[in-house]
């Protein structure tokens, strides 16, 4: 294979055998340039199994978000980098996609999905050594690129920075982007170091969020700083790929008895334990160095498809993302466990000089944590709730229910939110919901008074009716 050769492999259900020592008859290159082969393979979202059925997570950061529903095609990338002696020095095989929030020409914020194209190049990829980081760099589509550099010490290697550059001039992905041109987002790889001469494998999906971008990865196989030109057979698997051992069941021996019989009483049934209210989380967004969005809320999902399911959102693992604007603001919450919830707020004019904000849209996406595919997606853009004057906040401590569709509900607890005009990182004066109002105690009193009047009215009608019936009969 010549330096810089690119090939596109036909679709295959399994990854090709791992690269090893160059095949007999292949000459060593006298050039000092790196030889790299890159293949892109169309694949469905389901996990691909390698010839060795391995699993691991390293090079590429996490995967789990998806803001769109429905089936789509993604491409696998396989990169093999060779040194000057034509020996493999870095091998990577993975799948990825990106969720990007951008501002449209109308001022609204939209989320789009950027997938790899069928044509991928690898310009700039290098092997690395003791003093230089290894680099995997790929370019795809209309001016998009992605890269990760990896460093090593005496015993381990590890991803350092992951960089995505997306081009909003790509009208197929960003049809109405206000900002035009390339945008670069960098983030540190959060995954743990891997032992040298060990291949990292992770079929499970994982993701990383940075600014307005969520990077999603799955079916990852990678080994940097390959020794002796042969990818190792020793694997380091990500925790979610590692199978849990089943409990040992002692063998059973059938015995025959003829003298007695035993009657077993049915075990008592235990009622399912009710789900407790969710913990309350504090979330915020920034525009530059200034906080522009504040939210405090406990969230619970009620999903009723095959069977009812209550999901409490854990604020300790939930990451907040989104965008602030003058007329719209979006808060996106990712609980790190395949659940995505988005809230969109808008501003309305109630009079010539008075403006209010309100909740306009809520969308919920449940993902398959194994491959990132959508299990359920629901959206309701016709809300008109949680309204308050612009410059103030909205509060409702009592439970509220947002009906997303017939199968999905979002329950909120201890809500306090301000999507616009946040000052000094603090909530402004709150407008409370009716359920929290001090006048709420009057409702049962009013109902009791109404029932009392009704009883009195019925009693008076009964007395009048009896008098009329007596005067209707005269003695003869």
Image (cartoon, rainbow, N blue to C red):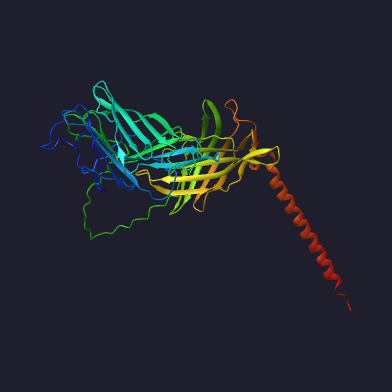
Q: With 139 as the anchor, is 213 left or right in this view?
A: right
Residue at figure coordinates x 28%, y 31% from the top left: 125
Q: Position of residue 399 (x, y in %)?
A: 57, 43
Q: Position of residue 278 (x, y in %)?
A: 50, 39
Whether residue 274 is visible: no
Give 454 or 101, whichever is nearer the viewer. Answer: 101
The quadrant holding residue 185 is: top left
On the rendered image, what quadrant is the C terminus found in?
bottom right
Q: Is residue 106 above or below residue 224?
A: below
Residue furthest bottom in the image: 476
Give 367 or 18, whichever is nearer the viewer. Answer: 18
Residue at figure coordinates x 41%, y 31% from the top left: 184
The quadrant holding residue 352 is: top right
Q: Position of residue 350 (x, y in %)?
A: 68, 42
Q: With 100 as the anchor, is 37 left or right in this view?
A: left
Residue at figure coordinates x 67%, y 39% from the top left: 437
Give 51 or 184, whichever is nearer the viewer. Answer: 184
Residue furthest top in the image: 131
């Amino acid at each position: 294979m010549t330096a810089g050769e690119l090939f596109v492999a036909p679709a295959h259900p399994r990854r090709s055998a791992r690269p090893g020592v160059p095949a007999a008859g292949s000459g060593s290159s006298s050039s000092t340039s790196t030889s790299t082969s890159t293949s892109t393979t169309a694949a469905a979202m389901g996990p691909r199994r390698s010839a060795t059925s391995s699993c691991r997570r390293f090079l590429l950061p996490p995967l789990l978000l998806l803001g769109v529903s429905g089936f789509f095609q993604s491409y696998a990338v396989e990169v093999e980098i060779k040194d000057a002696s034509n020996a493999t020095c870095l091998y990577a095989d993975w799948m990825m996609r990106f969720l990007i929030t951008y501002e449209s020409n109308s001022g609204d914020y939209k989320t789009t999905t950027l997938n790899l194209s069928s044509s991928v190049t690898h310009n700039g990829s290098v092997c690395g050594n003791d003093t230089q980081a290894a680099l995997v760099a790929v370019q795809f589509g209309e001016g998009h690129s992605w890269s990760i550099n990896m460093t090593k010490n005496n015993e381990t290697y590890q991803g350092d920075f992951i960089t995505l550059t997306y081009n909003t001039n790509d009208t197929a992905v960003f049809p109405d982007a206000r900002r035009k041109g390339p945008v670069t987002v960098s983030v540190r790889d959060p995954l743990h170091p891997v032992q040298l001469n060990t291949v990292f494998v992770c079929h499970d999906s994982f993701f990383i969020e940075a600014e307005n971008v969520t990077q999603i990865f799955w079916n990852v196989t990678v080994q940097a700083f390959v020794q002796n030109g042969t990818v190792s057979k020793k694997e380091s698997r990500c925790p979610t790929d590692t199978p849990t051992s089943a409990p040992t069941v002692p063998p059973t021996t059938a015995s025959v008895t003829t003298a007695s019989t035993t009657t077993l009483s049915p075990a008592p049934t235990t009622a399912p334990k009710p789900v407790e209210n969710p913990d309350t989380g504090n979330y915020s967004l920034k525009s530059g160095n200034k906080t522009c969005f504040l939210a405090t809320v406990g969230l619970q999902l009620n999903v009723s498809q095959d069977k009812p399911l209550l999901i409490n959102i854990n604020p300790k693992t939930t990451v907040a993302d989104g965008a602030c604007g003058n007329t719209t603001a979006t808060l996106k919450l990712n609980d790190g466990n395949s659940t995505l919830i988005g809230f969109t707020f808008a501003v309305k004019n109630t009079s010539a000089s008075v403006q209010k904000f309100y909740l306009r849209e809520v969308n919920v996406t449940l993902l398959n944590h194994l491959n990132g595919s959508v299990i359920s997606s629901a959206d309701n853009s016709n809300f008109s709730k949680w309204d308050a004057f612009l410059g103030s906040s909205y509060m409702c401590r009592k439970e509220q229910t947002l009906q997303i569709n017939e199968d999905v509900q979002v329950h909120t607890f201890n809500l306090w939110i301000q999507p616009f005009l946040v000052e000094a990182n603090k909530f402004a004066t709150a407008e409370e919901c009716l359920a929290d109002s001090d006048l709420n105690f009057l409702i049962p009193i009013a109902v009791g008074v109404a029932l009392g009047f009704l009883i009195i009215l019925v009693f008076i009608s009964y007395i009048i009716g009896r008098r009329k019936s007596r005067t209707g009969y005269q003695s003869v």
